[in-house]
Amino acid sequence: MTRALKLSGAQRAVLGGASIASGLDRQEQDALMSCAVAVRYEPHDVLFYEHDKARYFYCVLSGYVRLYRGSEDQEADIRICEPGDSFGECLVLEGQGYHYSAQAMEHAILARFDLTQVKALLDAQPRIGSAIARSLTQHLLATMDCLARDRMQTSQQRVAHYLLTHCTNEGARATLRLPFQKSLLARKLGLAPEALSRAFSALRGSGVTVSGRAIAIADVDTLRQVF
Amino acid sequence: MTRALKLSGAQRAVLGGASIASGLDRQEQDALMSCAVAVRYEPHDVLFYEHDKARYFYCVLSGYVRLYRGSEDQEADIRICEPGDSFGECLVLEGQGYHYSAQAMEHAILARFDLTQVKALLDAQPRIGSAIARSLTQHLLATMDCLARDRMQTSQQRVAHYLLTHCTNEGARATLRLPFQKSLLARKLGLAPEALSRAFSALRGSGVTVSGRAIAIADVDTLRQVF
DNA sequence: CGCAGTATTGATCGAGATCAAGCGAGGTGG
DNA sequence: CCACCTCGCTTGATCTCGATCAATACTGCG
């Protein structure tokens, strides 16, 4: 990490669109953002480790952050945070320490919120609490979805689902550009990189073409048949 | 389901100890409980299906409820709710439909909260919103924990973890009594019933003795070595 | 050009699902 | 009272998926 800086106008704009600030009016957003500074991390920098005493929560402004459990020989990713995603908000409500480790992938810029300051806001501005709660709800639903998919679907199906929910449609055809490395997508889906590779190979039979980060789906309905 | 009844005194007491009511004072608890009635379900009754329009959220008073995704040939359990656990609260904040199906295991009595009524309470009683948010936080943490374990640990390790976190210690020795059928424990841990059985067999080598629902752990530290 | 990080491909292995059969306890009815 | 059934659990045999290990190709990049 470099230095903590004031949020720029552009960064405040990104933050205003994030789910953590959704439904808040101008004044409430300002109050919330007054608790935040911008911080920058290099690839592979660790923001914090599981069980560390928590002083901040974060919202990704650019780059990617992975949240994971375990250490060294045995790691499992819990969530990959993209721009607009926040993490650690739950500590505003209760808890002393982080429940997972966080590591920046690529260069990442984040809004860092001071937990104590945000806590102090809650009584006067209950709608900020609601915004946090809505954000928690979305994380909960996403995590449950992930858990159910892990338990129910094969690697091919999970990859196909990712493609179908992230592609931009052009009639029957569709395309997408992966926002990050394949190894990170593999982690997100709970797979070894090799398994992701093989899943892509297998999906060629369903009209999926991969070249680097560019992916093309020949026919969306054909791909849906892998379920 | 039979009939909706007023909550009895004993039921209100259970509810008061549930995490959904934690941190609320008498008056707030009363307000919250005024939105609830008691309902009773027979084993295998389905409370609702995924995507059903949501009118209620629930808190388990007795018995067990499993939350699951998928249908018929392909099901995955997301959570097993025990007495004191609530589910569907997130719909107070946003969303129209349930995100999973819910089925009673054994006879189950639940407090059923009317979403519309609870929503109406929130503005006047923001601390009720906080209580719901805290409950969501706990579900989120539990679900992330489950996801990480699924991705990291073998069946034996997950079973051992369950035993160690649910047993009552008596020095090095420890015992516990399963609160429900083994098949339900298997679902909770994301295993086929056969796999749970085999995990128990394997754990015999670590001093675990199983007879029916009664389980004994010869030495807690020995068992911890499976990690 | 050559190197480092990233992705693919092949070969092998192991965990757990699935299928099928057998066991044991509780319940019912003749 | 005992034969019989059902249900939950266990055990064995097999199979499939994905992890792991190892080698090779690909892609920027200094």
Image (tube, coloured by chain):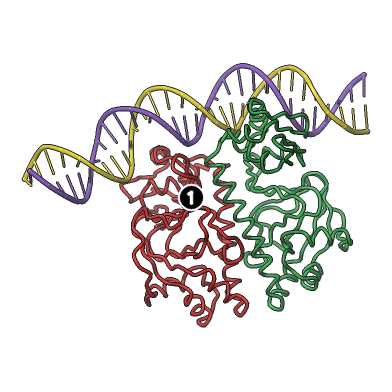
Chain colours: A green, B red, C purple, D yellow
Q: Nearer the viewer, residue A225 or A15?
A: A225
For mark 1, name the chain: B
Reply above or below: B84 against A150: below
Picture coordinates of residue A1 (x, y %)? 83, 53
Picture coordinates of residue B198 (x, y %)? 40, 37
What element does badge 1 sit on?
strand
Reply above or below: B44 against A6: above
Left of A139 or right of it: where is B209?
left
Which residue is disc 1 drawn over?
A: B68
Q: Nearer the viewer, residue B80 or B101?
A: B101
Q: Nearer the viewer, residue B137 or B203?
A: B137
Disc 1 marks which amino acid?
Tyr
Left of B129 or right of it: where is D15?
left
Q: Measuring 62% from the left and 32% from the top, which residue is drawn there?
A: A222
Picture coordinates of residue A224 (x, y %)? 61, 36
Q: Nearer the viewer, residue B56 or B224?
A: B56
Left of A31 or right of it: where is A71?
left
Left of A120 or right of it: where is B158?
left
Image quarter where the N terminus of chain B lies is bottom left
Toward the bottom, the furthest residue is B27
The local crowd at label 1, few if under 14, some if 14 to 19, many if 20 or more residues have their Cα within 10 Å, is: many
Q: How many marks?
A: 1
Reply above or below: A3 against A163: below
Picture coordinates of residue A133 (x, y %)? 64, 65
Q: Quadrant of residue D6?
A: top left
